[in-house]
Amino acid sequence: MRFTINNSLFTKIVSELHKLCSNKTLLPILSGIKIEANKDGAVLTGGNSEVFIEKKIPLQINGETVVEVHEAGSVVVLSKHFMNLLKKLPDDIEISSDNMQSVLIRSGDIITRLNGLAAVEYPKLPEIKILYSVEADFSSLREVVKQTIFAVSKSEAKPVLTGVKMEFEKNKLICTATDSHRLSRSEIRITNSEGSHSFVVPSKSLMELLHLKESGFATVHISIAKNMIVFSTGNTILYSVLIEGNYPNTKSLIPTGIVTKMTLNTKALIAGIDRACVFSEEWKHNNVHLSMIETNVLKIATLSTGIGMIEEKQRLSRVEGIPAIDMTFDGRFLLEALKEIQEEQVTISFCGLMKPAVIEPEGNSSYVQLISPLRT
């Protein structure tokens, strides 16, 4: 194997895959990156026990030659030292390997040799039998994942709650995440959806999806196979296992019978909650108290015996129902929910004492969040 490649492009892709490789694995070869050169360019693969990413580098990008393949072949190189070396090389690089046990790297007058591993020992990416597939706008998919992934459970006690539930339904993709104390649900339009299907994707895999560097106009193909999901866009393919288990029926959790509904400025509310959280550190759940002191004024307050107290008043844009709110919430949960809302105004609905509050962007029913109040 021997090929020459643009240094900055190659270093960028190796760095992305290095973050995915695991140094704590029963298979040492998974701490390496598989490099393959063929007539179409170079292919780099990295992964761990849950997710693999394959990055294809074509011979030309936007009419400019970035890869010249002199001899086809493949090898695996340990990612840590390889990445650190590439960052320190000044010019375009030549990668070669003739005995599968070492990799020769040339950059200008610099010659380096790293130990390699035989590519045949690297796990083969599965030849999956696709059960069904859909297409979606990549930027929209990223957005719907960002709006839900923060609500997954951080505990492995219920593994199915550590992932995001994805549902295909009537040309819609619905993403739902919950940790039993809060819930986030968002949906986007998709194409080619036939019937209703649902599955749970590990949050770690979706974090890697968020890190992919793709054009905002790219289309992503989502393919489902038995126990596996594949996201394919541009020159990148992400393979992930699915989480087995029965996801709770979250549709029944959304409360009805709204008692009070208030609308206010999103950015102002985020800033107010953020300030209150400075004084909530001593509380296990970052207690932030919300109360209405007038028919159109919300008070945000918290008290710390060791730090002090803070309270501020924010005027509401609109109030519907009974103007009486006196509840405490986890400030961190509120912040994580509110920061994913892009609209200028946010609506919070209260459905009674100790029932979850419903948070929605004003005029956008496709994005719904629930947060349970705290007992104080």
Image (cartoon, helix red, strand yellow):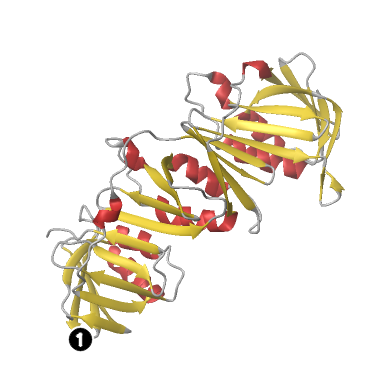
Which amino acid type is shown beneath numbered disc 1? Thr
Q: Which residue is mark 1?
A: 295
Left or right side of 277 for 222: right
Q: Residues within 10 Å of mark 1 (few under 14, many from 20)?
A: some
Disc count in the image? Answer: 1
* On-image quarter of the N terminus: top right
Q: Residue at x 44, y 35 (%)?
A: 242
**Residue 130, located in which quarter of the rendered image?**
top right
Q: Image height check: is 373 above or below 263?
A: above
Q: Is residue 367 visible?
A: yes
Query: Given the current orientation, which residue lies at the most extreme front position?
Result: 195
Residue 227 image position (x, y, % from top left): 46, 31
Is 145 in front, or is 310?
145
Q: Position of residue 129 (x, y in %)?
A: 56, 30
Mark 1 falls on what kind of element?
Answer: loop
Q: Quadrant of residue 7?
A: top right
Between 137 and 114, which is closer to the camera in this rendering? 137
Where is residue 155? Give x, y as percent.
30, 39
Observer able to see residue 279: no
Picture residue at 17% right of the left edge, 80% below the top = 322
Residue 113 occupies which quadrant of the picture? Answer: top right
Compare residues 334 and 320 and report the one nearer the observer. Answer: 320
Residue found 15% across the figure and 78% down from its top: 324
Could you tell me residue 14's position as x and y percent?
66, 37
- Quadrant of image for the C terminus: bottom left
128 left or right of 176? right
